[in-house]
Amino acid sequence: MSDPSDNHDFEFAPKGLVATFEDPFIYSDRKHEVIWDNDAYDFLQEEAPETANKSLWRQGQLCAVEAGLYQVTTGIYQVRGTDIANMNIIQIPDTNSIIIIDCLTCVETARKSLNLYQEFHKGQFGQDPEIKALIYTHCHGDHFGGVQAITEITGDNLRIIGPDGFLEHAKPRPKSNFYFPVYEALCMAENATHTLHNIQTLRGAQVRDARLWSRYLDQAIALFGDKTSVVFASHHWPTWNEDGQNLVLPFLEEQRDYYAYLHNETLRHLNNGQTPVEIAEGIEMPPNLSSKTHLRGYYGSINHNVKGVYDKYMGWFDGNPANLWPHTPVDAATRYVACMGGSDLVLAKAKDFIDKKDLRFAVTLLNHLVFADDTNTAAKEELISVYTTLGYGCENGTWRNIYLTGAYELDQGPQAAINAISLESLMSVDLDELIDVLAITVDGPRAFSEEGVTIDFMIGDMKASPKQPTEGAGWHVRLSNGAVTGRAVKYVPSPEPRDPNVTLTVWLLHKALVELVASAVAGKPTSIDSLENVTTYGDTAAWDTITSLVTQPNVAFNIVTP
């Protein structure tokens, strides 16, 4: 049950709307198809049906406010309802300039959002705003993917500010907080939003540090808590102090304490010998915090966050030798079904557990049945029904999606993933990460039978580091023992002497190297000999040797079936 004080949510979520869109649709630049329609969420304004958790439905209602431009406070605006994230816009006092915080997922949603603000700004000040800088709060795609919409206006000289290590996408970097003293406004990025966040995501990511999360929240409180009148973020709606009541400070303090409690209590039970599952099932959270809707598990959950904290300190293994060397799911399933007397008996037992409302164990039995024999239609139908029921009951939106996606796969087959890697994104990564994009596609067993090759790429329009005064970066790529690896080397201008031990040296521009890698990863490798404005020394077939080993990922692999 939520805390009655959280009724402020329905006051705050629509507060400050100053401009709306004439057309709710956002169309793709490449195909004339709708990629965003906020009106599609209008159904959420109805009463919650039996097929959805009422608390999650309430959260959906709050998120599905009218798409438009919202004033957070004098000089600060948010565009909401055009993307899964917010675009925050800060007016620099006494100027015609603005700073943008986060630019959404793609160019189309970012462009439409920025256009709405520009129209509003021009109506207020009689001229278009000058964009002084773009700030990335962190390295998730929904916060930087629309950058091209900004550079369409500013050109390539746009000042972009991001957290240290932003380009190292794989690392769990902290999200940046900002305080604007003239506006008494605190931007908390994703560190304090209207949901419990993920310590470890179910989609896959490195574990975040719940202890540091709590510490950084406390740091923000200590620095700015008594100076802040409104707190806003990259998602959801702001929280304001109102009618002499300080709502900002309790909001931040409760978030701080919840993450700290999750961390500390998990470690307390861990040190008593409990496993991740045991801790997640038994942990008792403070009732006065659990009742707060901004701490409900709509995105992160207590259950999987506890397991994330455990994983950070202990890894995947719970210490039980029975879990050290398990069979594959198929091999284990066939043995379980045989031990339990065969498919018919297992199916009957699963139905008994369904009748007893123990859907979790029914899932365990039915999952074994499907993995033992994926042609067992009766088992699949029961599992579809149970997954659907579990999904409908979930307060956590991600859990709901996982259950319902599992049911869909059993019924319709797996859905193909969308390739989100673009040439623009590859242009922005470091050279080591660029080559790693290629390296992880190489077929190891085929590669370790190949004779090794080495390639030095000399990139004339790059710097080896920001502190290097001269242009030119070198990157050494090698194939040996089935692995593609590399390292930085000294840039050598063409046609100066090269390393005689290298199979091939290539002098080219950065974009040409990115295109070489991108085409290889896409399964359409480009020969170096076919490139223009490229100088080579050595055997150009060395690149062909590597690209011939590239494999294409299965973008529609099974998850809930063998």
Image (cartoon, rainbow, N blue to C red):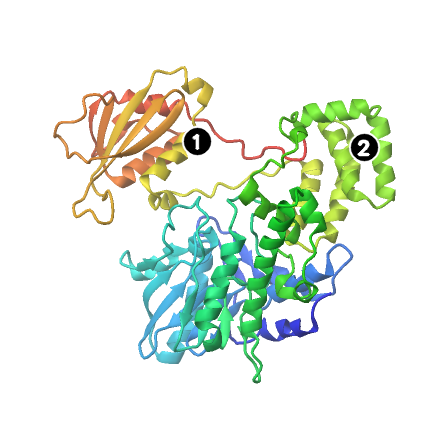
Residue extending furthest toward the front: 272
Quarter residue 458 falls in: top left
**What number of labels is visible?**
2
Image position, residue 167 (x, y; %): 37, 48
Tell me the crowding category of disc 2: few under 14, some 14 to 19, or many 20 or more residues within 10 angstroms, Cα based. some
Which residue is more in the foreground, 435 or 273?
A: 273
Image position, residue 462 (x, y; %): 23, 43
Residue at x 71% of width, y 53% of height: 394
Which residue type carries mark 1?
Ile
Image position, residue 333 (x, y; %): 73, 27
Tell me the crowding category of disc 1: few under 14, some 14 to 19, or many 20 or more residues within 10 angstroms, Cα based. some
Residue at x 38% of width, y 51% of height: 166
Asked whether residue 414 appears in the rendered view, the answer is yes
Q: Which residue is mark 2?
A: 378
State which quarter of the image contains the N terminus: bottom right
Residue at x 36% of width, y 53% of height: 164
Q: Secondary structure at mark 2?
A: helix
Image position, residue 189 (x, y; %): 47, 62
Q: 342 above or below 258?
A: above
Asked whether residue 404 appears in the rendered view, the answer is no
Mark found first going from the N terminus, 1 or 2: 2
State which quarter of the image contains the C terminus: top right
Q: Which residue is mark 1?
A: 440
Q: 107 above or below 170?
A: below
Q: How far, Cα to Cα, is label 1 from label 2?
A: 39 Å
Q: Secondary structure at mark 1?
A: loop
Which residue type carries mark 2?
Ala
In the displayed structure image, the side of residue 508 where residue 404 appears, left or right: right
